[in-house]
């Protein structure tokens, strides 16, 4: 009797373990959901945006079933390493500092970074011009690296999400903000809250900080998955799926040179 | 020698101690901000709490109701929500942004945190003190009456001093809760102790290093606070222990008292 019980328990355990290993074939993708137009959350909770569409297109190309896992930007890489998901498709720039922790695929887009401030501001973006000015940016981004490297005298105000940066810029808590130009344009300047604001200065780029563009991050041990993604990126670039998604969000080619 | 130590740590330590050491001044600065926010809000909150507790313990319904509403609201909602309401909520209204209070106070994250924290701890301290006031030994009050103390005098000389003392152990918890609650400041751009941990994580993508350093420093602060309160209690609550026993062995004395 007792022995039977043990056998049943063991049998169940095997079943459960078996089931979970079948589930592992499913790919979990870490996404952010607070970075329009690349990713945002609709009021009903569904995730939308360029990153989300690209992730789904890549999954379809790889013929893998995918689920999107939402994660705050702060914990994006730690959660990947903790196996909460298997890849990050969240506009993450390929940089040297991040390459120490994770591996990246080839880029899937590349857009320049810019400053945004009130229209007609006297602010100029020289080193001296931003001295002591409050510049808002999202913590843990390439832009934080850029600002700390090139504007050590500016007062950096760090936010958890890009949306909060825009919010505080709109009500004047910060003098300017520094971010991806597309995120600023679509997420802020084209909205009602951003109508009195404009880009100041041209494109900013620093190879060490900004890297070659946004790629998909995977754990260092997952080279096979990385190669799978690379092939899929090439494939959707070639078969027109990428261009279709591009056209849905932007009037120009975000893939970059 | 120094290089040898660094090389040794680089290869053998599971966490990047060198990075922590390099940024330790930032952590100390963050700890300073945390201490500032915690203790200033405790002072402000405490000053608000004393009159409110007297009202709550009294029986004037006209005054009692709004104070009850205040403590109920601030104890019934999370500190994070309260802080967001002050920081993001108030900034939404144009008339507030144009008022005199915006520039020097409400536009600053630090002030928003201080206001929210002060009101929050004021609410908890009010109820804590109210309990202590209400549980004042009737005999003490009667003795004061017999000596001809006025109501005001009774409050000042007998009820409040005794209530403060008895509220002390519970208040030490409130102080530690406030210290822990102050991490909320890091969500509204303040570089407090946790804020520096998050900065390190954001800069180097090392979650463990940033947060473990912050955790250890919080632990040290809590240790100092709880030690301080224990000494304070020994002094202030002396009269509640059996007297002779305390002098020789306070712990044993208390045990005897319970039997």
Image (cartoon, coloured by chain):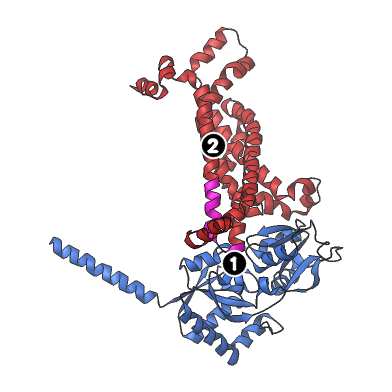
Q: Which residue is mark 2?
A: B224
Element at label 2: helix
Identity of the residue drawn at 61% across and 28% down: B55
Q: Is residue B24 above or below residue A4?
A: above
Residues in magenta, as a range: B203-217
Residue B214 is one of the magenta-drawn residues: yes
**Quadrant position of residue A199:** bottom right
Question: In the image, which lettered chain appears blue?
Answer: A
Looking at the rendered image, the disc whose residue lies closer to the viewer, 1 or 2, is 2
Q: Are marks 1 and 2 on the same chain?
A: no
Element at label 1: loop
Front residue of A208/A65: it is: A208
Question: In the image, which lettered chain appears red?
Answer: B
**Quadrant position of residue A241:** bottom right
Horizontal side of B62 relative to B180 (left or right) equals right
**Quadrant position of residue B248:** top left
Identity of the residue drawn at 56% across and 19% down: B159
């Amino acid at each position: 009797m007792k022995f039977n019980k043990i056998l049943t328990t063991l049998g169940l355990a095997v079943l459960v373990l078996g089931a979970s290993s079948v589930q592992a074939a499913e790919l979990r993708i870490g996404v952010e959901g607070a970075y329009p137009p690349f990713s945002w959350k609709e009021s009903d909770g569904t995730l939308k945006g360029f990153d989300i569409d690209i992730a789904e297109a890549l999954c379809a190309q790889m013929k893998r079933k995918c689920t999107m896992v939402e994660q705050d930007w702060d914990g994006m890489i730690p959660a990947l390493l903790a196996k909460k998901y298997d890849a990050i498709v969240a506009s993450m720039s390929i940089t040297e500092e991040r390459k120490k922790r994770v591996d990246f695929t080839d880029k899937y887009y590349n857009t320049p970074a810019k400053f945004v401030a009130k229209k007609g501001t006297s602010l100029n973006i020289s080193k001296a011009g931003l001295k002591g000015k409050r510049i808002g940016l999202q913590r843990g981004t390439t832009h934080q690296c850029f600002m700390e490297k090139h504007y050590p005298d500016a007062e950096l105000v760090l936010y958890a999400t890009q949306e909060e940066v825009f919010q505080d810029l709109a009500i004047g808590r910060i003098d300017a903000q520094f971010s991806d130009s597309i995120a600023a344009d679509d997420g802020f300047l084209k909205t009602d809250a951003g109508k009195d604001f404009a880009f100041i200065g041209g494109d900013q780029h620093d190879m060490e900080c900004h890297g070659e563009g946004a790629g998909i991050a995977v754990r260092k041990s997952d080279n096979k998955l990385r190669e799978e993604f690379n092939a899929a990126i090439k494939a959707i670039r070639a078969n027109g799926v990428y261009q279709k998604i591009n056209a849905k969000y932007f009037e120009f080619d975000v893939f970059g040179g | 020698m120094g290089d040898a130590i660094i090389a040794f740590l680089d290869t053998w330590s599971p966490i990047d101690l060198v990075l922590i050491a390099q940024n330790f001044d930032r952590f100390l600065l963050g700890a300073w901000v945390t201490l500032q926010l915690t203790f200033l809000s405790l002072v402000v909150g405490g000053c608000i709490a004393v009159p409110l507790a007297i009202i709550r313990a009294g029986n004037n319904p006209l005054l009692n109701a709004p104070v009850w509403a205040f403590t109920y609201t601030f104890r019934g909602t999370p500190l994070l929500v309260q802080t967001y309401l002050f920081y993001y909520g108030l900034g939404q209204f144009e008339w507030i942004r144009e008022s005199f209070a915006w520039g020097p106070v409400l536009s600053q994250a630090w002030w928003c945190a201080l206001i929210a924290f002060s009101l929050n701890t004021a609410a908890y301290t009010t109820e804590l003190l109210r309990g202590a006031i209400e549980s004042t030994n009737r005999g003490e009050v009667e003795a004061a009456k017999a000596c001809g103390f006025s109501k005001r005098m009774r409050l000042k000389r007998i009820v409040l001093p005794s209530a403060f003392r008895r509220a002390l152990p519970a208040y030490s918890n409130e102080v530690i809760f406030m210290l822990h609650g102050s991490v909320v400041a890091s969500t509204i751009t303040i570089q407090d102790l946790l804020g520096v941990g998050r900065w390190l994580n954001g800069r180097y993508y090392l979650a463990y290093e940033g947060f473990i350093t912050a955790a250890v420093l919080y632990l040290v602060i809590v240790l100092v606070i709880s030690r301080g309160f224990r000494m304070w209690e020994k002094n202030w609550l002396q009269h509640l222990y059996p007297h002779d026993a305390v002098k020789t062995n306070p712990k044993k004395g208390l045990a005897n008292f319970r039997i």
